[in-house]
Every structure is written in C-alpha cells, then in structure tokens.
Amino acid sequence: MKKKFKTLSLIGMILLTGNLFSQNASDQKASDYERAIQSRAEKIIKELNLKDSVQFKNVQVLMVNQYKQLNSAEQIATEAKKKGDTAVFRQSERLLKETHASYLRDLSAQLNQEQVDKIKDGMTYSVLPVTYNAYQDMIPSLKSEEKRQILTWLTEARELAMDQGSSDKKHQVFGKYKGRINNYLSARGYDLQKERKAWEERIKQQKGNG
C-alpha cells in the first residue's frame, strides 16, 4: 500500500512539475510577445518625431492594443477554419472590421492624417510608398490617371494588410494588388518585361556612375 501511495505521489509530482513548466513557458511566450509589440510600436512612432511624451504614450498604447486584437482575431479565425465553423469565422471577420474602424478613429483623435498614414505604413513595412515609387521609376511615362489608379489600389491593399497578423500575410495582400496593377498596365499597352529590363539597366548605370 505504501509503495502504491509513493508511486501515485511521484506521478502527481511529475504532473504538477509538468504543468508548472508549461505555465512558465506560456508566461514567457506572452512576456516575449508583449516586449516585441511594445518595441515595434515604439519604433514606428519614433518616425513621427512627436514632442509630447503623453501623446507618444497614448499612441503606443493604441498600437499595442491593436496588435493584440489582431493576434486574437487571427487565432480565432484559424481555429474556426480548422473546425469548419463558418459562423464564428464570419463573426471574427466582422469584429476585425469594427476594430479597424475604431482603431483609426482613436488614432485620428491623437494624430493628423499624415501621421496616421505613417502609422499605417509602419504597420505594413512601407510597402505602399516603396511599391508606388518603384512603379514610377520603372515606367517614367506613366500618365497621371494611371498613377492615381496605382495609388488607389495600393492604399486599398494597405488598409487590408493592416489587419493581417503576420508579415507573410501582409505581403500576400499586396501581392494580389500588384497582380491587379500589372494586369491593368498590360491592358493599357505597357510591356512590363521590357519596362522592367530597361529599369534594371538604368539602375546598373546609376550604380556604375556612382
């Protein structure tokens, strides 16, 4: 009987230790994530050169909370997809749109439109300005209405990419819109392969001259 009791006690200790290790690992992961998003938000906000420390902190809190909401929404959506629960999946998408609108309202209460756009670019790795400039450099003959259309689609892509939890998913959103832009330009008579090749040659020449 004593031997059996000792065995059960040992099993209990092992299970308890395992749970403690699991909890510690979970706590550490949460702590690492918190530090990561705090640092990410701080880095983006520094680009705004805000002089008011209270304003800086307010914006940082908004950004950190938004990152957490995006992470939670993505986890719910992923789990709903696995289970085939379309109702929960659609609800998570609906909540994401509401969160997006609320987040932008709160940012606009702290910042002007130019600053809000910089936050958006920061959250999406500046893909919009980089891509927009790249198209103009690649095709110098772009007409004004074509530039406007490219910018409109990239802006739309940025709004959607902001709500994606991972870097890969953000870039996937922009990838779809780049495909749309390329099809649009091709339909308007641009030979994109030719334009790209000529652009690469210009870059080589500039580097050579530099």
Image: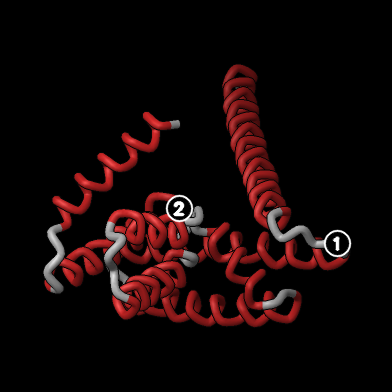
Q: In the rendered view, would you say 155 is above or below 26?
A: below
Left/right placement of residue 6 relative to residue 149 reads: right
- Residue 81 lies, in percent from the top left, at 31, 64
**Up-down relation of residue 24 to residue 69 (above or below):** above
**Residue topped by disc 1:** 51
Three-letter residue code for mark 2:
Ser
Screen quadrant of the C terminus = top left
Query: Element at badge 2?
Result: loop
Q: Which color mode does the image show? A: secondary structure
* Circle on res. 166: 2
Which of these two is toward me, 183 or 99?
183
* Image quadrant in which you'd find residue 104: bottom right
Q: Position of residue 201 (x, y in %)?
A: 25, 39
Residue occupying the point 74% across, 66% down: 59
In-front residue for pair 182/172: 182
Q: Categorize mark 1 by other alpha carbons within 10 Å: few (<14), some (14-19), many (20+).
A: few
Q: Nearer the viewer, residue 79 or 63?
A: 63
Residue at x 63%, y 32% (from the top left corner): 21
Q: Quadrant of the N terminus?
A: top right
Q: Give the number of the mark in front: 1 or 2.
A: 1
